[in-house]
């Protein structure tokens, strides 16, 4: 799935062949003393546990607009979003960071999407542009979608199935490298760009791949069964693109809207201003209430200033929130203990597991990598990032929001959360390594500078000389995503695209997909793991598949040790009193803008 936007990132997802039930999936959301819906304030106690929440597959009736109204809400005003990072991609086909996807909800629609009840937080997968979540045939290889009547672009041009097909065809273009790759891989195989290079040469995918028998029907023919297709169609990039407005790579800065808002002004790294799209018809949209007249998204706001603005809520900050940015670690204790913040606090589990990648192309001996695991001071890092309110200590590749999660701790990290330098030294001695010097790259932000100093001190106790280098936060994932990057250690966060480990282990651990921008950031290429991924993906018994993913995750961590997991993330921050309808999007791990209104 997505990487967490603690720093902006570029991502590329491998096709998972998970055979998920076309009825419901389960994920976990933090009960945290507060609800998962309505105004999600109230919770946030340290050590809150995840509770199971279902994501149900909705019916055609559930897919009818308008969206469920928020009690007491009204239209009008400007809502403000304060974000620490710039936006790497606005093109929905390139959007994969949760920040990009959640902001994209305001101007981009997909075939399916998650309808969130503003009172209960119940999450239902429904048809967004489509009349339902899809009809399968041919044993799950063929999926048919029908577009709702009355769908239009921001200039009033009708949306057609041909434009949806064109949107899928764009995914094959050489410049479309950052977004999910499930659909194009399912359609044409892992080497999909060899089969087709996009629509710009004048060629189109044949009807045997994607057919549009009429203006409102699109038929996808996959190479293998994919009952999880309804969930894949909720990812960015499954919507239409109007060919007359397609500026190819430049579309990334000025996409044409089919959602409730259109882009009025965009200053990269500074501001994105969205105004109401007069041609959006709420009767077609079961997902978005779109109460504010405008969204003013301020970008590149340094911490701790961002969090302090939300806490103090002066001026228009009373009508502000942070859709994605978590509270600054220095302010987290004040928020967690301050009664004045309780009514406007959101504390929820996210689908992300944060890890430090060990570049296996450079650090080749698994004993050295295991030494880093033992030396790693996970408790100090957790503290530096805000403590337990910001995330639980992690010891597995798979997080608690994923179906079948079973906690594992093969290195006994919970017993020695401050690190075990003696064990690390022993492993380095076994590997015949002396005077180990490594390079750690981190995003140029205050909290990661603190973490860098923390790691330097802890690793020095194990005889490891950690050289640190700061890199630009907006292009962070692009830089560490290079195959030949010059770094030995660097942090990423990854979450399931939907709550199955088939969207965690294959994208991050399949060595056959190593390339610039690929999400196997540690460059693991273990033939046993690659073969095991193929084997597990073919298991159709979901409970057995979940067990096998967990076992494979434990094997990878114990034997290959390509990453050091350290935190199961939580969203923890406050919003201004001037906003109502602040709900939470569990699949994306961010505040849900679709129900927000200005009081």
Image: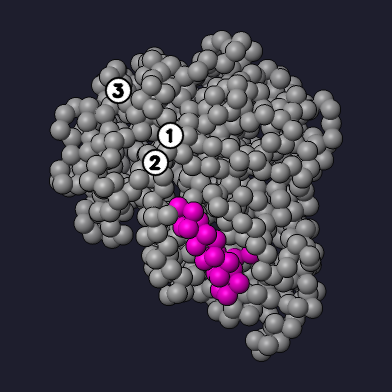
| Quarter where residue 598 is shown | top right
**Residue carrying label 1:** 57
User: What secondary structure is found at the residue carrying circle 3?
Assistant: loop
Q: How many marks?
A: 3
> Mark 1: which secondary structure?
strand
Residue named by callout 3:
148
In the image, residue 302 sits, relative to residue 194, either above or below, namely above
Quadrant position of residue 253: top left
Distance from disc 1 to disc 3, alpha carbons, whole Å, reads 18 Å
Q: CA distance from mark 2 to mark 3?
A: 21 Å
x and y, in percent, of residue 350 in the image: 61, 43
Q: Are marks 2 and 3 in contact (CB under 8 Å)?
A: no
- Which span of residues is magenta-colored? 542-565
* For marks 1 and 3 on the same chain, the one whose residue lies earlier in the sequence: 1
Are the residues at dot 1 and dot 3 in contact (C-beta closer than 8 Å)? no
Mark 2 vs 3, N-terminal side: 2
The quarter in which the C terminus is drawn is top right
Q: Nearer the viewer, mark 1 or mark 3?
A: 1
Magenta stretch contains residue 549: yes
Left or right: 366 in relation to 318: left
Q: Are marks 1 and 2 in contact (CB under 8 Å)?
A: yes
Residue 15 % position (x, y): 37, 55
Q: Is residue 473 visible?
A: no
Check residue 22 in the rendering and tell me which mark sits there, or answer none: 2
Q: Label 1 neighbourhood size at 10 Å, few (<14), some (14-19), many (20+)?
A: many
Query: What residue is rendered at 74% in x and 57% in y?
Result: 381
Residue 84 is one of the magenta-drawn residues: no
Identify which residue is drawn at 61% across, 56% down. Answer: 406
Q: In the image, what residue occupies the spot 46% across and 70% down?
A: 529
């Amino acid at each position: 799935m997505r990487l967490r936007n603690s720093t902006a990132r570029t991502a590329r997802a491998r096709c998972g062949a998970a055979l998920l039930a076309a009825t419901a999936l389960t994920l976990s959301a933090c009960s945290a003393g507060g609800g998962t819906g309505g105004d999600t304030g109230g919770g946030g106690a340290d050590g809150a546990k995840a509770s199971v929440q279902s994501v149900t597959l909705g019916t055609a009736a559930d897919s009818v607009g308008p969206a469920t109204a928020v009690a007491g809400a009204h239209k009008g005003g400007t809502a403000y979003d304060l974000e620490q990072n710039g936006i790497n991609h606005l093109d929905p086909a390139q959007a994969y960071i949760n920040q990009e996807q959640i902001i994209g909800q305001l101007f981009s629609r997909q075939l399916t999407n998650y309808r969130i009840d503003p009172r209960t937080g119940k999450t239902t997968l429904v048809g967004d542009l489509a009349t339902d979540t899809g009809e399968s045939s041919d044993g799950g290889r063929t999926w048919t979608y029908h577009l709702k009547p009355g769908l239009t672009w921001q200039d009033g041009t009708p949306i057609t199935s041909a434009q949806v097909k064109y949107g899928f065809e764009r995914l094959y273009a050489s410049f479309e490298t950052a977004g999910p790759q499930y659909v194009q891989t399912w359609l044409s195989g892992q080497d999909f760009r060899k089969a087709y290079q996009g629509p710009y040469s004048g060629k189109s995918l044949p009807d045997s791949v994607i057919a549009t028998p009429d203006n409102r029907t699109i038929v996808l023919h996959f190479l293998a069964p994919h009952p999880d297709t309804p969930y894949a169609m909720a990812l960015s990039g499954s919507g239409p693109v109007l060919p007359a407005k397609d500026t190819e790579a430049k579309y990334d800065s000025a996409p044409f809207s089919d959602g409730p808002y259109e882009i009025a002004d965009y200053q990269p790294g500074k501001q994105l201003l969205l105004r109401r799209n007069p041609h959006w018809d709420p009767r077609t949209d079961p997902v978005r209430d779109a109460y504010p007249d405008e969204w003013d998204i301020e970008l590149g706001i340094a911490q701790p200033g961002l969090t302090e603005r939300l806490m103090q809520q002066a001026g228009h900050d009373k009508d502000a929130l942070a859709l994605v940015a978590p509270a600054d670690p220095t302010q987290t204790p004040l928020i967690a203990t301050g009664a004045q913040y309780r009514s406007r606090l959101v504390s929820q589990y996210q689908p992300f597991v944060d890890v430090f990648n060990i570049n296996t192309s450079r650090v080749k001996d698994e004993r050295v990598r295991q030494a880093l695991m033992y030396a790693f001071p996970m408790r100090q890092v957790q503290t530096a990032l805000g403590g337990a309110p910001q995330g639980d200590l992690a010891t597995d590749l798979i997080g608690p929001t994923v179906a079948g999660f079973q906690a594992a701790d093969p290195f006994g990290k919970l017993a020695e959360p401050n690190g075990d330098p003696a064990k690390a030294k022993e492993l380095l001695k076994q590997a015949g390594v002396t005077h180990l010097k490594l390079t750690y790259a981190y995003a140029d932000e205050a909290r990661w500078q603190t973490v860098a100093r923390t790691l330097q001190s802890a690793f020095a106790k194990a005889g490891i000389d950690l050289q640190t280098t700061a890199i630009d936060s907006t292009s962070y994932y692009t830089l560490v995503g290079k195959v030949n990057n010059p770094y030995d250690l660097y942090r990423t966060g990854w979450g399931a695209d939907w709550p199955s480990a088939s969207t965690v282990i294959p994208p991050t651990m399949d060595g056959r997909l190593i390339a610039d921008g690929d999400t196997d950031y540690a460059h693991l290429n273990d033939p046993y793991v690659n073969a095991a991924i193929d084997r597990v993906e073919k298991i159709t018994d979901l409970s057995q598949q979940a067990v096998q993913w967990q076992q494979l995750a434990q094997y990878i961590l114990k034997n290959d040790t390509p990453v050091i997991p350290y935190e199961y993330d939580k969203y923890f921050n406050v919003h201004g009193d001037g906003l109502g309808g602040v709900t939470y999007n569990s699949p994306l791990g961010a505040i849900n803008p679709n129900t927000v209104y200005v009081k």
